[in-house]
Image (cartoon, grey):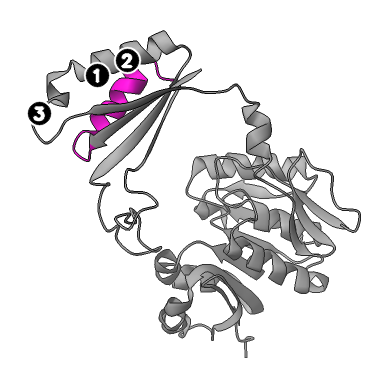
């Protein structure tokens, strides 16, 4: 296998990438800031809920993988022959053509994901690992298409809350709004919640949640948001602050009197915004914090 390394301006990155994948039979193409790891490096994405500083890097490095050296060399020749790749100030240049040692890519990818401890007795464990001896509850979950593998602080904080309140979940109806991989719904079910509804706007998330629930031998009903109905003693939503503010009336409408609302995907600086948004229905407080993210929870007042 051989790697072709190119430099391209922001205006040409998409054209070069498309040509490599669609016309020149590259096996894969990665793009990174040419100034990465230098003082000139700049962030491409902003904080959650904030606009991106720019649409792309001023100059990018593209790395394309090919089966053979001949295929990589031919791709470079064809690219450099294109008139659009030779415009003054917008040129594409080849910086390297390297042989790539054969590796077990599956094993390499798997090595990046270790079991995640929520509590000493509650773990998230990829299928290629054995559960720790002390684990009494285990969520079997592999990285996939949907958000939520347990590595992000927001997911871990939500699962930690579930573990701390597990004694009250037996037989309780739970709603996981914006379920992603279904990890919070599965965690609730492992602590005895029944029934558990998991909803998401992304069809891939619904499919993934259904598959993950089956793999963990728990019953979770997954579907579109309109599937949620009635009141739930526990409503979980690990999304982001902006949609959480917009969803305040809907989420609070699903919380049963005396029930709990657990919100995540919130930065520390956004706490007051969320308190104001939810104030007409319940009082939110910060229950946990990790790496700049916070968990906010509240109890809906019992009916008079």
Work out whether residue 49 or residue 87 is closer to the camera in this orientation and state it: 87
Residue at image position (30%, 17%) is 76
- Residue at disc 2, secondary structure: helix
Residue 82 shown left or right of residue 146 in the figure: left
CA gap, disc 1 to disc 3?
13 Å
Who comes first in sequence, dot 2 or dot 3?
2
**Label 1: few (<14), some or many (≥20) within 10 Å?**
many
Task: Give residue 183's position: percent from left, percent from top.
Answer: 66, 53
243 over 100 or under it: above or below: below
Helix, strand or loop for disc 1: helix
Q: Residue at x 58, y 64 (%)?
A: 154
Q: Which residue is mark 2?
A: 75
Residue 33, compared with residue 179, is above or below; it is above
| Residue 231 location (% of width, % of height) | 62, 69
Callout 3: few (<14), some (14-19), or many (20+) C-alpha neighbours within 10 Å? few
Q: Quadrant of residue 30?
A: top left
Task: Point out the stretch of residues depicted in magenta.
Answer: 9-26
Q: Which mark is residue 79?
A: 1
Q: Is residue 182 visible?
A: yes
Between the C-alphas of marks 2 and 3, the distance is 19 Å
Quarter assignment of residue 236: bottom right
Q: Looking at the image, which residue sits at the far bottom?
A: 304
Q: Residue at x 40, y 80 (%)?
A: 273
Is residue 39 covered in magenta? no
The residues tagged by marks 1 and 2 sit, at their Cα atoms, a distance apart of: 6 Å
Looking at the picture, how far across and down is residue 141, in whole percent? 70, 45
Q: Which residue is mark 3?
A: 87
Q: Which quadrant of the figure contains the C terminus? A: bottom right
Instruction: State the residue in front, 201 or 43.
Output: 43
Seen as rendered, the residue at the extreme top is 70
Check disc 2: other Cα within 10 Å, few if <14, some if 14-19, many if 20+.
many
Name the chief secondary structure element in magenta: helix
């Amino acid at each position: 296998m051989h790697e072709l390394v190119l430099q391209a301006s922001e205006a040409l990155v998409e054209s070069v990438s498309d040509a490599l994948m669609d016309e020149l039979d590259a096996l894969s193409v990665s793009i990174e800031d040419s100034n990465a790891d230098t003082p000139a490096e700049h962030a491409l994405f902003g904080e959650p809920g904030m606009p991106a500083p720019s649409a792309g890097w001023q100059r990018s490095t593209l790395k394309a993988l090919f089966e053979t050296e001949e295929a990589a060399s031919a791709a470079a020749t064809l690219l450099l022959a294109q008139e659009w790749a030779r415009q003054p100030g917008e040129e594409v240049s080849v910086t390297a053509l390297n042989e790539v040692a054969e590796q077990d890519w599956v094993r390499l990818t798997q090595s990046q994901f270790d079991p995640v401890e929520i509590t000493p007795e509650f773990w998230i464990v990829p299928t290629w690992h054995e559960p720790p001896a002390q684990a009494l509850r285990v969520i079997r979950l592999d990285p996939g298409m949907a958000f939520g593998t347990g590595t992000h602080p927001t997911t871990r904080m939500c699962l930690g809350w579930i573990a701390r309140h597990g004694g009250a979940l037996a037989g309780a109806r739970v709603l996981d709004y914006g379920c992603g991989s279904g990890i919070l719904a599965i965690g609730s079910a492992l602590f005895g919640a029944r029934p558990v509804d998991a909803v998401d706007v992304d069809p891939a998330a619904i499919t993934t949640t259904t598959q993950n629930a089956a793999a963990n031998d728990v019953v979770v009903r997954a579907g579109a948001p309109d599937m949620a109905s009635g009141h739930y003693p526990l409503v979980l939503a690990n999304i982001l602050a902006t949609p959480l503010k917009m969803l305040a009336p809907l989420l609070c409408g699903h919380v049963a009197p005396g029930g709990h609302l657990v919100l995540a995907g919130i930065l520390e600086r956004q706490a007051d915004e969320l308190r104001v948004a939810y104030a007409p229905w319940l009082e939110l407080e910060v229950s946990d914090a990790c790496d700049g993210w916070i968990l906010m929870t509240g109890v809906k007042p019992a009916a008079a």
